[in-house]
Image (cartoon, grey):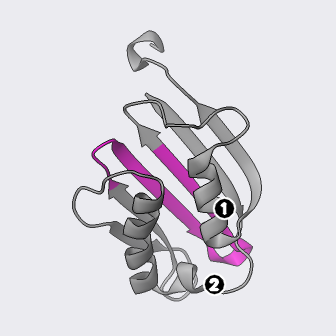
Amino acid sequence: MAILVLGGVVPGDQGIFLDHDVLRAWVPELCRLIDMHPVGEPILQPYGSWGEGSPSIVQFLEESALLIHTYFERRYAEFVLHSCNPIPGEGPEGGPVTEAIVAQLALDVRERHYLGSFNWRELS
């Protein structure tokens, strides 16, 4: 198992925060770029006090799941990628999945955490 948490400021166009159709269409493209395989459609839930709200979205994957939280008021997005297997090429300093997310959004990374290759049974 592996977990990647990546958060940062999204400069420029805020369409990803407010246009739910844009976000729904973007998530499968992101999955393709990071070589993960969607299962079903993305599940989007708006919340917060910004009109339609800043959405969170869950995409179940053959490998596990991708969760994205958006914070319109801070122009911030947080990605949590949970994988049943190690995430290919990712390590403590970065990797291709991190690079793909950063490139797609011109993300100004403020936090990144990677926990690679662990067995959940050993954590309890």
Q: Main secondary structure of the magenta part?
A: strand
Quadrant in which residue 59 is drawn: bottom left
Say which label, 2 or 1, has the lower sequence index: 2
Q: How many marks?
A: 2
Left of 39 or right of it: where is 86? right
Give x and y (percent) for residue 70: 57, 68
When the figure is inspected, residue 17 is found, relative to residue 67, above or below; the finding is below
Q: Does residue 23 belong to the magenta stretch? A: no
Q: How would you rate the neighbour count of disc 1 (Cα within 10 Å): few for under 14, some for 14-19, many for 20 or more?
A: some
Residue that numbered label 1 is attached to = 102
Under circle 2, the secondary element is loop
Q: Can residue 79 be found in the magenta stretch?
A: yes
Picture coordinates of residue 28 (x, y %)?
37, 67
Q: Which residues are magenta?
A: 60-81
Quadrant containing the N terminus is: top left
Amino acid bearing label 1: Val
